[in-house]
């Protein structure tokens, strides 16, 4: 796990320091960064704080169903974004039209992520089999892969506007919150989550997305600290 920690730490450094060249300063330093001294006990306490929101997820089957629904819904958005990018490349729409359409889809992704975090926050820890933990882990990885690959193509081809910057900062911040919630619900998820997401994030290098990914990277760096070494 030490190698994983250093890989995440290296990427975290690029996330804080990556320049915003070529995007006219649209990408700014992320100010809502997860504290690097965040401990597992603090995460668990945060999940157990309670909420007045009605929650339908009471077991691992419900959690898996909720994540599958989230992934399916977000695939609709990423598909629309990819189609918008293709239409721009084919000259069917202008760059501004494409950026506006894509921002609408990113906003919808933000709404869907916020909804599931609200539904899960405050729920008690779930007793699940190792197989269910692996299912949840796989769903989280494919979900993040879907979002990151789509967003990377989006900003590479269309560039990143101030509006899109704000939306993506919010999306990745909510993803970080979702990871915190899931770890609180499934304690056995932590080792696999850190191991799986580290190379996924490191693969993005020091590109334009790096500063926007700071909430996720900082969280994983905290989780992969000495306690898991």
Image (cartoon, grey):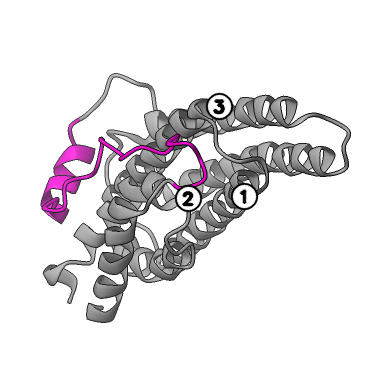
**Label drawn at residue 90:** none
Q: Residue 178 location, x and y as percent?
A: 38, 43
Where are the magenta residues, as a range?
Answer: 21-49
Asked whether 39 falls inside the magenta stretch, the response is: yes
> Closest to the observer: 206 or 194?
206
User: Looking at the image, is mark 1 or mark 2 earlier in the sequence?
Assistant: 1
Residue designated by label 1: 156
> Closest to the observer: 164 or 171?
164
What's the distance in space between the residues labelled 2 and 3, CA to CA?
Answer: 19 Å
| Residue displayed at 19% across by 47% down | 43
Q: Residue 82 location, x and y as percent?
A: 74, 44
Q: Which residue of the protein is positioned furthest toward the top in this rendering?
A: 52
Under tag 1, what secondary structure? Answer: helix
> Closest to the observer: 86 or 64?
86
What's the distance in space between the residues labelled 1 and 2, CA to CA?
Answer: 8 Å
| Residue displayed at 37% across by 47% down | 211
């Amino acid at each position: 796990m030490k190698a994983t920690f250093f890989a995440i730490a290296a990427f975290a450094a690029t996330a804080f320091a990556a320049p915003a060249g070529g995007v006219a300063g649209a990408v700014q330093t992320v100010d809502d960064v997860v504290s690097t001294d965040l401990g597992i006990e603090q995460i668990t306490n945060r999940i157990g704080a309670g909420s007045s929101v009605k929650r339908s997820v009471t077991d691992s089957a419900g959690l898996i169903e909720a994540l599958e629904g989230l992934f399916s819904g977000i695939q609709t958005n990423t598909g629309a974004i990819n189609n918008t990018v293709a239409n721009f490349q084919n000259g069917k729409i202008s760059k501004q039209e494409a950026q506006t359409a894509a921002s609408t889809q990113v906003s919808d992704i933000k709404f869907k992520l916020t909804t599931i975090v609200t539904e899960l926050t405050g729920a008690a820890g779930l007793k699940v089999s190792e197989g269910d933990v692996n299912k949840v882990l796989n769903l989280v990885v494919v979900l993040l892969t879907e979002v990151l690959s789509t967003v990377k193509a989006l900003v590479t081809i269309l560039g990143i506007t101030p509006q899109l910057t704000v939306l993506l900062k919010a999306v990745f911040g909510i993803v970080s919150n979702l990871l915190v919630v899931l770890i609180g619900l499934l304690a056995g998820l932590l080792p696999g989550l850190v191991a799986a997401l580290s190379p996924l994030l490191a693969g993005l290098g020091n590109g334009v997305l790096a500063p926007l990914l700071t909430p996720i990277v900082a969280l994983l760096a905290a989780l992969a600290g000495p306690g898991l070494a």
